[in-house]
Amino acid sequence: MDLNQDLITTVVGSYPARPSNGSLAKSYFEDVDSFMESIEMAVRAQLDAGIELVSDGQTRGGMVQIFAEKLKGFRMKRRPEIISNIEYRGPITIKDQSKIRNSLPENIGLKGIITGPWTLVKSSYDLYYKDTRKAVTDTAEALKSEIKELSKVCDVVQIDEPFLSIEYEPYIKDVLETMLPSNITTAMHVCGDVADIAEKLVEIDVDILDHEFAANPHLYDIYEELSFSQRLAPGVITTDSKVESVDIIKERIERAVDSFGTNILIDPDCGLRNLKKEIADIKLKNMVEARDVVLDERS
């Protein structure tokens, strides 16, 4: 897809789609991947809403679980445990992304999503390293192979690092930059209130910064004062169950455009996994409709 378009609509990642009970039961007795049903459901919901840069919906599990259970060194408990050297054992999301890529229209983009090394490590009990920096560095090195493969089939690779809004270490910048390929557009999503670390985030060499502007409108003031080269993806719908009207979303988009111009991406604050699917569907449709109104009025 043409990533230079104004006001491209996208999603942060997760979507409330689940395999049917019948599909899950069938997979128990037959060699059937029931989760392809939920992935296709998530992608279809995005396409029906008019989203131009879609994700796989992260329907195979939580953002930490999906990666921790496939990387060497993690043991899956209620909270993942790090029990040995963290290493890459093979493809994690590549198969899903490749199947989606082959089914998408040419004008629709695909976003591959990686849960970042800082969030993976901080979400786990470290029973092995006892040195957070080493654990994070090894996790980043392990994920590089996954990112390299994603860059072959996706238009954008996004690193999710929600834990950065809770705790930030200076070495994170260098660690993250070692992961990111130069041959693809890269994004970083940090949810929560990033006001205190915004000036650090803009120093990281990514192409797109994605944050929760709808829930934290004071971020407009913060970023308006900063000098940065990245495109922004300011969230314009929240992740709660209240469905914003087209007019309200339009006002948020207009504020974003007034602050940062039209070379931004339009998306939700964060993943929509915890919403009812019918609510998530309406939110996305209203978001796209509001974007269309803004484009029409400015054309």
Image: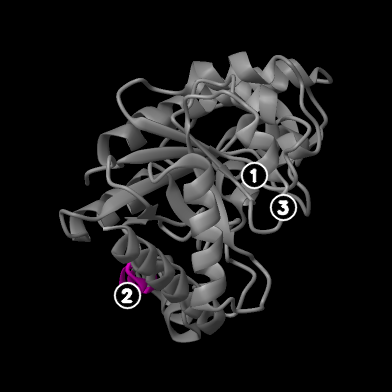
Query: Which residue is under mark 1?
Result: 220
How far apart are the two marked residues, 3 and 2, measured between alpha carbons?
Answer: 28 Å
> Where residue 238 sits: x, y (%)?
63, 65
Rendered-image quadrant of the C terminus: bottom left
Residue type for callout 3: Asn
Write the residue at 69% across / 36% down: 222
Query: Which residue is under mark 2?
Result: 48
Q: Which residues are magenta?
A: 44-50
Q: Are marks 1 and 3 in contact (CB under 8 Å)?
A: no
Q: Earlier in the sequence, mark 3 or mark 2?
A: 2
Write the residue at 20% across / 61% down: 103
Residue type for callout 1: Tyr
User: Measured along the vertical axis of the image, is residue 41 above or below residue 259?
Assistant: below
Q: Quadrant of the rendered structure where residue 174 is?
A: top right
> Where residue 278 sits: x, y (%)?
51, 84
Element assignment for label 1: helix
> Where residue 140 sits: x, y (%)?
57, 24
Whether residue 13 is visible here, answered yes or no, is no
Residue type for callout 2: Asp
Q: Quadrant of the rendered structure where residue 117 is?
A: top right
Asked whether residue 49 is drawn in magenta, I would say yes
- Crowd rating for badge 2 (residues with CA inside 10 Å; few <14, some 14–19, many 20+): few
Viewer-side residue, 42 vs 81: 42
How far apart are the two marked residues, 1 and 3, measured between alpha carbons?
Answer: 8 Å
Q: Looking at the magenta stretch, what is its main secondary structure?
A: helix
Marking on residue 216? 3
- Nearest-to-viewer mark from 3 and 2: 3
Whether residue 269 is visible here, answered yes or no, is yes
Viewer-side residue, 144 vs 164: 164
Viewer-side residue, 189 vs 136: 189
User: Measured along the vertical axis of the image, is residue 225 above or below residue 7?
Assistant: above
Element assignment for label 3: loop
